[in-house]
Structure formats: C-alpha cells, structure tokens
Image: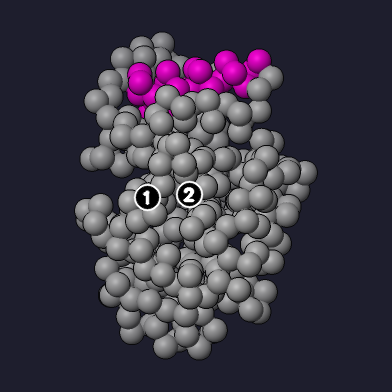
Amino acid sequence: MQVTVLAGGIGAARFLRGLVSATGSTHDKPSVTVIGNTGDDIRLFGLQICPDLDSVMYTLGGGADEERGWGRANESFTVLEELRGYGAKPDWFGLGDRDIATHLVRTQALDAGYRLSTVTAGLCERWQLPVSLIPMTDDRVETHVVIDDPDTGQPAAIHFQEWWVRHRAAVAAREFVYVGCDTASPAPGVLEAITTADLIVLPPSNPVVSIAPILSIPGIRDAISQAPAAVVGVSPIVGGKPVRGMADACLSAIDVDTTSAAVAQHYGPRREGGLLDAWIVDLADADAAPAIADLGIRVEAMDTIFSNPGVASNVAASALKIGSELRR
C-alpha cells in the first residue's frame, strides 16, 4: 500500500515512525511519501532553516533529541553562545551546533541554485530515511501571524517562528497569512504522490500552521479532494487540549474550538467538499464520536498518545485498515 502523509511538527514525525513500522517501508523501497510543511521555514544568521522537514528527517533517521522533541540528539550550543556573546540578533531562536551543520549544507546548496526538493533528498540520503520526504513547494512560502503591535496597538505581521518561539504564542493572533502561497507551485512529485496513493493521512499536526500551509499551495487541496484514496486524519486534540505545542492559540484565531470534533468539522467531510473520510480520536474523546459521525465522517476511538512507538504503530495500522475499507 502506498501512503501519502501531509506532515508538520513532532506529532507527525512520531506518527510516521509508527507508520513505517506498520507498512514495512524501507529506504530501498519506500511505501510512504511525506509532503512536508515549509511554511515554518526561516532564514536566520544567513542560514536557511526548515524546522518541520528536519523534525521528520532527524526522527526517522534516528538523530532526534527524544527528550526535547526537536533538534539533534547529543547537541551542544557553542556557536549559539558565541553569537550571543557578540550580541547577534535574534537571540530567541536556539541553534545547536549539529543542527547548524544541516543548515549550512542546505543553504550552500540553495544558494548554488539547487531546488529545495533536490537539496532535501540529498540531506535525507545521509540519514537513509525509510520514507520519501518532499517539501510542499520549492518556492518561498512563509507563515506570518497578524497581531496587535504592543507599542502602537495597530495590526502588525511577524514571522510565525517569532510568534511561536519568542512569544510562546502568548500574544493573541488575529490572523495567519501564508505569504507567497498564491504564486507557489507544488514541488516535483507532490501531486503524483497524492493522486497515486492508496491512502492519504493527515497526522496529528497543528491544523493551522502545519497542515493549512500545505493545503494553501494551489493544486494540492484539489488533488486530495479528487484522489481515489481515502483520507484518514488523526486528531491532534485530546480531551480538549493539544497533545503538544500551542495549537489552541492557533485554533482560537480561526474561531475553531479546541476539541477533536471541532477540528473534524473544520476539515469537513470529503463527500461535501471537505477533506476527511475518517477521523481517529483518542479514547478520551470517544463521546464525541456520534457528533463527528453525523458530519459524514467515519470515527475510530483508540489510544493516540504516543507514549511509546507501539501506540503510534497501532494508530497507523488502524489508519491503514480504514483506508483499505474506504478507498474509492
């Protein structure tokens, strides 16, 4: 079975680890294609940083810091300390020494004229990933957040990373804008991965800043709506709270409640122009199943807290089973 996953963030990366186990996908014969969010990308200190692509690469390559959930394992921060010693700005974004090596290689290749998709494939070779990882686009697309400027009280746009990392999403967001999406094109292989898939998965990623930027690229949402494969989502909300991160601050900005049912309704049933054929929720939200089913979305309730790799594998196996049953 060929599976295509729209991915962004740590939750997606950990789900993918279970999906690899459930599908038997390997580096030599990948049965999983990952379309990675690049809306989080930012250039700092002259380096092109791709947080979501790197989270997938490090996690599936065995190089992620499992305790922090992001960045490299066995990391040091000598360069960051030196930058701060010089008073270099910004001082709110942490770059580890091993992580910087990835950004140096990526930036050098991009500045030489290579496309991000080509560069990403090259970086992934080092890690021998058991999936094919493709950025959503080779074009520059950035997620910006419109806030009320604390000094003037007027609306102002800042990069998502500044809002997320520096402000910890504590400043109320008025709006999320995917700058550059209107003129961007899907990266090579993206549409093919969607149209030829046997299953499409929306993993437990932030709907607003991980999944929505991918869907904002012209052609991607339409390809999903017309694909013969079933679309199965995994709720990133458990018991009214995000499993990780601050998705509640993002959802409130688009007037969506922080519940698994509200996120399912936000995505919508595919038979009515939405995205979902099925929605996997945690056991804590099993009582929401009838309301979700009333939308025309199949529901499965099970343990979705990835406390160990086995849980992720079970969720992935359930998604595969549902996908086989619902494929058009």
Depth check: give the residue in front, 6 or 257. 6
Q: Earlier in the sequence, mark 2 or mark 1?
A: 1
Q: Residue at x 56, y 20 (%)?
A: 107
Question: Dot 1: few (<14), some (14–19), or many (≥20) neighbours within 10 Å?
Answer: some
Residue 32 appearing in the image: yes
Q: Amino acid at mark 1?
A: Gly
Mark 2 crowdedness (10 Å alpha carbons): few <14, some 14-19, many ≥20: many
How has the structure been colored for display? Answer: one colour
Residue 311: x percent and y percent? 26, 60
Q: Secondary structure at mark 1?
A: loop
Amino acid type of the residue tagged 2 in the rendering: Ser
Is mark 2 in CB contact (under 8 Å) with mark 1?
yes
Residue 238 percent coordinates (x, y): 33, 68
Q: Main secondary structure of the magenta part?
A: helix
Q: Which residue is mark 1?
A: 24
Q: Is residue 259 left or right of residue 105?
A: left
Q: Which residue is mark 2?
A: 31
Rendered location of residue 15, percent (x, y):
37, 53
Give the residues drawn in magenta, as a range. Answer: 89-112
Which part of the image, by quadrant, shows the C terminus? bottom right
Q: Is residue 7 magenta?
A: no
Residue at point 73%, 43% (across, down): 184
How far, Cα to Cα, is label 2 from label 1?
Answer: 8 Å
Residue 91 in view in this figure: no
Seen from the viewer's position, the closer of residues 47 and 86 is: 47
Q: What residue lies at 37% left-to-right and 72% top-to-bottom? A: 281
Q: Is 13 left, or right, of 90 in this rendering?
A: left
| Place of residue 29 in the rendered image (x, y in percent of width and height, measured from the top left) | 46, 41
Specify whether 50 is left or right of 27.
Answer: right
Query: Which residue occupies 61% across, 44% down?
Result: 136
